[in-house]
Image (cartoon, grey):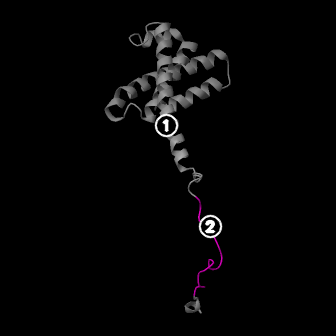
C-alpha cells in the first residue's frame, strides 16, 4: 500500500489541474503514505535486519510523505501526527534522518556490488608468473611424439 501511495503521490505532483487541486490531492495521498509507512516501519524490526533494502525503501517513502505534507499542508501534518511531528523543526529533522538512513543502507549495497564486480574482473598475471610458452613441435633435444595411434 505504501508503494502504491508513493506512485500515486508522484503522479499527483505531476498531474494536470489547478495548483490548489494538485496540492490537496497530494496532501491526501501523502497522509495515507505517512500513516502506512509508520505502520510498516513498526513491524519491520520484527522481520527484517536494519540493513535490509526494504527498510531503505520505506524510510524514503515516509520521508516523501513528510516532505509533501510540509510543502502542501503543514497544518494537516501537525494536526494528524501531533506526537511524531509537533512542529516544523521535528518534521524536517525526521525527514532528514529518514533520508540519511536510507542512503546509508543503499551505500552498503553499492559497496557490496562494487566489491563483487571487482572480484569478478580477470586479474593481470604478475610479472613473476609467466604464461607457458606455446611451441609447435618437439623441443630441441626431444624426440618427436608418435601420433600413429590416432590414424
Residue 34 drawn above or below residue 125: above
| Quarter holding residue 12 | top right
SS label for mark 1: helix
135 within the magenta span: yes
Residue 1 drawn above or below residue 73: below
Asked if residue 19 lies left or right of residue 3, the reply is right
- Residue at 59% from the left image edge and 81% from the top image edge: 142
Q: Quadrant of the C terminus?
A: bottom right
SS label for mark 2: loop
Residue 43 drawn above or below residue 65: below
Q: Which residue is mark 1?
A: 109
Sequence-first tag of 1 and 2: 1
- Residue at 57% from the left image edge and 50% from the top image edge: 121
Q: Which residue is mark 2?
A: 133
124 within the magenta span: no
Asked if residue 42 lies left or right of residue 9, the reply is left
Residue 89 position within the rendered picture, expressed as x and y whole percent measured from the top left: 49, 7
Residue 132 position within the rendered picture, expressed as x and y whole percent measured from the top left: 59, 65
Q: Main secondary structure of the magenta part?
A: loop
Q: Residue 145 or 117: which is nearer the viewer?
A: 145
Q: Which residues are magenta?
A: 130-145
- Residue at 43% from the left image edge and 31% from the top image edge: 55
Count the marks.
Answer: 2
Q: Residue furthest front?
A: 141
Q: Residue 87 or 28: which is nearer the viewer?
A: 87
Residue 31 position within the rendered picture, expressed as x and y whole percent measured from the top left: 48, 20
Q: Residue 78 or 16: which is nearer the viewer?
A: 78
C-alpha separation, residue under disc 1 versus residue under disc 2: 42 Å
Neighbours of disc 2 within 10 Å: few (<14), some (14-19), many (20+): few
Amino acid at each position: 500500500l505504501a508503494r502504491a501511495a508513493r506512485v500515486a503521490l508522484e503522479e499527483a505532483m505531476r498531474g494536470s489541474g489547478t495548483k490548489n487541486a494538485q496540492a490537496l490531492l497530494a496532501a491526501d495521498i501523502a497522509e495515507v503514505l505517512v500513516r502506512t509507512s509508520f505502520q510498516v516501519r513498526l513491524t519491520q524490526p520484527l522481520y527484517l535486519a536494519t540493513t535490509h533494502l526494504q527498510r531503505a525503501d520505506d524510510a524514503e517513502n515516509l520521508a516523501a510523505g513528510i516532505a509533501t505534507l510540509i510543502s502542501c499542508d503543514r497544518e494537516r501534518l501537525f494536526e494528524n501526527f501531533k506526537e511524531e511531528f509537533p512542529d516544523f523543526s521535528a518534521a524536517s529533522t525526521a525527514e532528514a534522518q529518514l533520508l540519511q538512513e536510507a542512503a546509508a543502507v543503499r551505500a552498503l549495497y553499492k559497496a557490496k556490488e562494487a566489491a563483487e564486480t571487482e572480484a569478478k574482473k580477470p586479474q593481470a598475471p604478475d610479472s613473476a608468473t609467466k604464461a607457458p610458452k606455446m611451441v609447435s613441435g618437439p623441443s630441441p633435444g626431444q624426440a618427436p611424439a608418435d601420433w600413429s595411434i590416432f590414424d
